[in-house]
Amino acid sequence: MWPFTENRFDRVVAIEHDEQRDQFVQYKRNSQDIIEETSISSKHFFIVDTLDLCPLGSSYLVVELVGELPLRYLVLCDSYRDYLSALREAKSYGRAKYGEAMSDHMWQRSPVEAFLMRSGTTLFTNLQPHELKVVALDFEMYTSAGKHFAASSDPMDKIILASLADNRGQTYLLDESLLGEAGLIKEVCRLINQNDYDVICGHNLVGFDLPYLTTRAQQLNIPLCLGRNRSVLKQRAITRRYGLREAPEFFVFGRHIIDTLPLLISWDITKRALENYRLKDAVIALGISPRDRRDFDRGDISQMWDSKAADLLDYAQADALDSLALYSFLSPALFFQTQMLPLTYQQCAATGTGTKADLSLIRAYLQKTHSLPLRGAHVLGEGRGGLTEAKSLGWHQDIHKADVASLYPSICLSFNIKPRTDVLNAFPAVLKVLTERRLEAKASLKTLPPDGYEFKATDALQNSLKILINSFYGMLGTSGLYFSDSEASNDITTRGQEILLKMVDNVERAHGKVIEIDTDGIYFTLPESTKTAHAISCLVAEELPPGIRVDYDGHYDYMYSYAPKNYLLVKNDLLIRKGVVFRSRRLFGLQNDFIVVCVDKLIRGDSAGLAAYYRQTARRIRAREVEFDSVITYLVVDQTMAEYEEGLMTQGQRSRPLDLIASRPDRDKWTLRSKIYYYHAGNGEIKLAEDFAKDIDPSYYLELLRKTAEKFLYIFSPQDWYRIFSETPLSDEEARLIRPWFFVPRQMPATLAEYERVIKGDFQLRLF
DNA sequence: GCGCTCTGCTTACCT
DNA sequence: ACAGGTAAGCAGAGCGCC
């Protein structure tokens, strides 16, 4: 069975449907790095659940699929024209019969996807990521005086530079002052065709460069002939979510458009390694910048152009090289998914992981000409999730972490959980094949030199398999997919909860103390510290169901547990912060510093130092002796000023930072997804960071300091917490006597209720 | 009219 | 169109109090 069966395609880099000739065109990059073109005729199809939907006036053939599932009538058309009219009719019958739910009673994908699905083939077979011919594209635009951004509609705001860099080592820099804008655009097209690239990439290419280029080319009346068949760049009116806003989709016949910005954003959702998604900052933060270069403000580009600065050319060239570096970093996982799925490279980037798992099951069914379930038919009610609990708040030493390897996929395979509709057992079969492939890849990683190219490629392969494997669980709980089934989803999480509870029980029976549990992992301490990693994982894994493997996942010197999913770990003097309480991007510098210093003092048992640090910080706030970074925060702009003002009128929805910029003449400077940096000044007012003059509101920041100290509530007894985190002078002698108290709710005299009173501020009544 | 608490919404995080 | 679980900030509504 799929996915790694016979593949009649070899080294195919692109496949397109030529609507005029109604043929599929396949582009193969042969071993001499030359493109070979082949045309293939194929039929078109869609699937419906009742013959009522089969159109009357079109020419088509109905194939009845086998099995008892509802989507059983495959409408097969000889020509694209017949397909379009049959589809149109079926949809209009469907709307009459099912109303809004019409699309749940059909299965339909684009001609190319349906072709890949029916033929059981994929792109990129027997190719490696570096064998694709890739060009990074970057334009610099002129911004006329008085504006913050270039506007493609303004004749003055022309494209002044185009920079191209490809992965065969070639770079091009096209200068408008030499070529003219029209000449520059024509030259870009010529270079792309001459070098016959498979992939056009760029940073925010879809959100900025391509729309800009399209408008300028239209105004200059230049056709953007970028396609392999010399067809023009196509823009689909249907917009799709692109980051926060909607953007059109662009297509070049025979090539893939890959924008590194959305790839970077999704990469960072799990990694949380970046402060922003600017190209320059990203390549530096990721350590993949091709070369050092001088940094200057984007706003200066036009001024540099006017003064003919040579630096600008450097900058433009470096931008394309950076884009290419970012592409090389982010794209391999996408490449290997494209090898496995009936999607083009470009579609693969734009498709969610649940849909990918769903598609892989649908392909398994259609390969057996089997009928399909209705879309979204098996999702009922609310789902249950993983189990989470902070079982022992406070400070701990000598901590072990153990977790279950691939918990949800293992449960699916061990307990044979699958969608109720999956009569062919494709779900476990595909999951098993993917899991085995991943284990093979992980095994071969150990035999490869870690710096080599093969290592990176194999790592990307196993990583893309991991993503696909994990999405099989997510698929079940998603409405709007064909094989979703919330009952199966709940079965999996229920088993997961039982397994986790059994692990807790195992630790407690060994007289260990469980600190934090979350879904598939457990932090705990054990009475003896001499145990080996293997012995500990065996202890935790006792009496677990077969097929469930527990891994030892590390030892930590200290752990401070504050709340579920919110804790600190210390290992070899390295502080690891978990949870929004300790590592949110919105923490003030003041709070970050406090967390780091506090842990440092606690490790050293330096209560006096901690008390002194708190007093000193409070004193500096009162004296307004603060660093810029300590007191600045930001709001991400998620609506246009027009939308904000509209919302203000209709619903009265206020936002103080947006109010701050609303009346400013330079308010257009803040675009969607940009940040408004501000701080709290006197009288509860907020002010823009750019107007910072140390005129902070001490009461706001003192409260912030106190709230941050509250995150360390469970370190001391309530009384001692009050004495340490206080502005009242505490002699060093007294402070030294206060030892961190390793608070455990069930064993220590203080109750959570007493700590709550500390937060509310009425605990001191008992003290004095 | 002021200040407090409650609630709903949103964001940012964890596995 | 992958899931659910958690903390916490913000702004508005509702309320009691003076």
Image: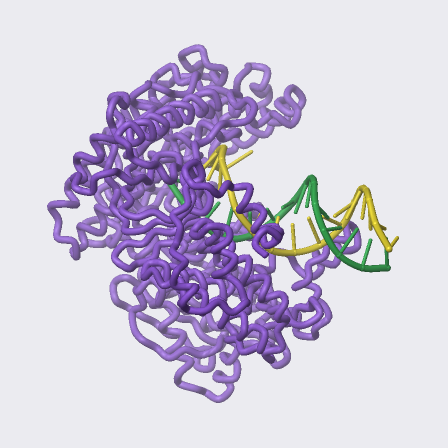
Chain colours: A purple, B green, C yellow
Q: Is residue A22 visible?
A: no
**In the rendered image, the vertical position of residue A14 relative to residue A724, given as above or below:** above
- Nearest to the observer: residue A46 or residue A752: A752
Q: In the rendered picture of this protein, how many numbered marks are placed on residues?
A: 0
Q: Where is residue A355 in the image (x, y as percent from the top left)?
A: 44, 34
Image quarter for residue A544? Answer: top left
Quadrant housing the N terminus of chain A: top left
Please indicate whether residue A544 sits to the left or right of residue A75 in the image: left
Image quarter for residue A606? Answer: bottom left
Please indicate whether residue A220 sits to the left or right of residue A552 in the image: right
Q: Position of residue A160 (x, y in %)?
A: 48, 76
Q: Position of residue A105 (x, y in %)?
A: 55, 22
Please indicate whether residue A625 sits to the left or right of residue A495 in the image: right
In the displayed orientation, state which residue is furthest to the top.
Answer: A68
Image quarter for residue A3? Answer: top left
Q: Is residue A699 visible?
A: yes
Q: Where is residue A352 in the image (x, y as percent from the top left)?
A: 45, 40
Q: Residue at x 51, y 64 (%)?
A: A588
- Nearest to the observer: residue A51 or residue A56: A51
**In the rendered image, the vertical position of residue A308 relative to residue A498, given as above or below:** below
Quadrant housing the C terminus of chain A: bottom right
- Nearest to the observer: residue A95 or residue A618: A618
Q: Residue at x 39, y 70 (%)?
A: A319
**In the rendered image, the vertical position of residue A738 relative to residue A302, given as above or below:** above
In the displayed orientation, state which residue is furthest to the bottom.
Answer: A307
